[in-house]
Amino acid sequence: MDESATTLRGMRRATAFAPGRVNLIGEHTDYNGGLCLPFAIDLGLTVAAHRVDGGEIDVRALDLGARDRFEVGTREPGSGWTAYVRGVAAELASAGYALRGARLEIQSQLPPGGGLASSAALTIATALALLAIGDLPPPEPVALARLCAGVEREWAGAETGLLDQLGILCARSGHAIRLDTSDLAVTPVPLALGDWTLCLLDSGVRHAHAGGGYNERREECRRACALLGIDTLRDARPGDVERLPPPLDRRLRHVLTENARVDRMVAALRESHLCEAALLLDEGHASLRDDYDVSVAPVEAAVQRLRAAGARGARMVGGGFGGHVLGLLPPGRRPPPGAVPVRPGAAARVVGPRTGCAPAS
C-alpha cells in the first residue's frame, strides 16, 4: 500500500483497489477480542479519483447508476452507500488530512450484503483514492482500519470489529492472516491448496450489518461479559458457559470453540492437512448455526449444494443471516453451477492513474 501510494503522489488521477475478504475461520470473534483467519480475494472494488478545484466531492456509483455530491468535511449524514463515502471524507478531514475536491467513480464486483466485506472495501478504497490525489501519505494499516471501522459504526450504524478492515489492508498473496484482535498481531499463514479448490456460493439472501441480527449478537456478548465480570469474551473460560443463562451460554460456547478452531486451522494448513481444514469448516458452520443462531434456510440450502457437489467442508462466511457460503472441494471435484473459485490475493492498494472519470456536469 505505502509503495504504490508514494509512486503515484502528485497525480491528479489515481485508482485505488480494495479486495473482498473471505474469513476462512473465526467468525463473530473479532469484536470479542478473539482470533480470525481472513484472506483477500481477487474480486473487489475500485474507486477512480480525479482531483478538481474547489472543495466539492462528486461521487458516482456506476453499478447503481447513482450519484452524490457534498463538501469536503461535511458532517451531514448520507444513506446507503453514500454514508460510507461521506463518512470516510469527514473522518479523514477530522484526522487532519487536507483533502482536495474530487470526482469519484465507484465500480464493484462485490455484492452488498454478500458476506465479502463490500462496505469495508468501499471505505478503504475511497480513503486511499482521496489521499492519493491529495498528495497525502495514507495512515498505517491499523490506523486506517480503525478509521474505516469507525465510519461503519458512526455513519452506517454497523457495530463491526476490525476483521474486515485488517483482513483487506494486511492481506498477503497466497496467504491467510492469523489476526489476534486482542493485540492486533497479524501473522501470515500459507494457504497452499494444491489441487483442492476453495469456492464461494451465493445463498441469494442479502444481509445488513446495521440491521437487527448482527448488532443484537454484539449486545448479547456485552451482556455476557457484564454477567461474568470480564472485558471481552476472550477472557472467559470453558466453565463460564454454565454460569450464563440461555442464549448467552451458547454465544460464549461459540466464541470459545471458534477461537480454538482458528489455531487448529493454522496447524492444519501448515501441515497441508486439507481434510482436517475441511472438517473445521463444517464444525464452524454447525457452531454458527446452532450456538450463534445466524443461519437462515437459504444458507443451509447453499451448504447442502456444496456438499452434494463433493465439498469436504462448507460454512457460511461474514456476519450471517445470508450472504455467501465457502466450500472446500478435493481434487477431481468441480464446484456446483454458480460457485466462484477463490484464492488468496494481495492487500488493498493504489493501482495506478486513470483518465476515464466522467467530466463534471
Image (spheres, rainbow, N blue to C red):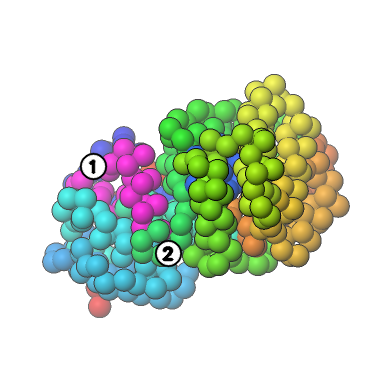
Quadrant where the N terminus sits is top left
| Residue 129 against residue 332 in the figure, above or below | below
The kind of secondary structure element at disc 2 is loop
Residue depicted at x 20% and y 56%: 93
Determine which of the numbered discs, if any, sits on residue 157 in the image: 2
Instruction: For marks 1 and 2, give the CA distance.
Output: 28 Å
Q: Is residue 269 visible?
A: no
- For badge 2, the amino acid type reads Gly
**Left or right of 361 on screen, residue 122:** right
Mark nearer the viewer, 1 or 2 = 2
Q: Quadrant of residue 137?
A: top left
Q: Main secondary structure of the magenta part?
A: helix
Residue 310 in picture, x, y percent from top left: 84, 46
* Quarter of the figure with the C terminus: bottom left
Tell me where residue 274 appears, x and y as whole percent: 74, 31
Picture quadrant of residue 269: top right
Q: Amino acid at mark 1?
A: Pro
Q: Which residues are magenta?
A: 128-152
Q: Is residue 79 above or below residue 139?
A: below
Give the x, y percent position of residue 145: 38, 45
Residue at coordinates 80% horizontally, 45% vertically from top-left? 311
Residue drawn where x is 86% and y is 52% of the image: 308
Instruction: Please name the residue shown 32% across and 42% down the image.
Output: 143
N-terminal-most mark, 1 or 2: 1
Q: Which residue is mark 1?
A: 137
Q: Secondary structure at mark 1?
A: loop
Q: Quadrant of residue 319?
A: bottom right
- Residue 99, percent across and down? 19, 56
Q: Is residue 10 in the magenta section?
A: no
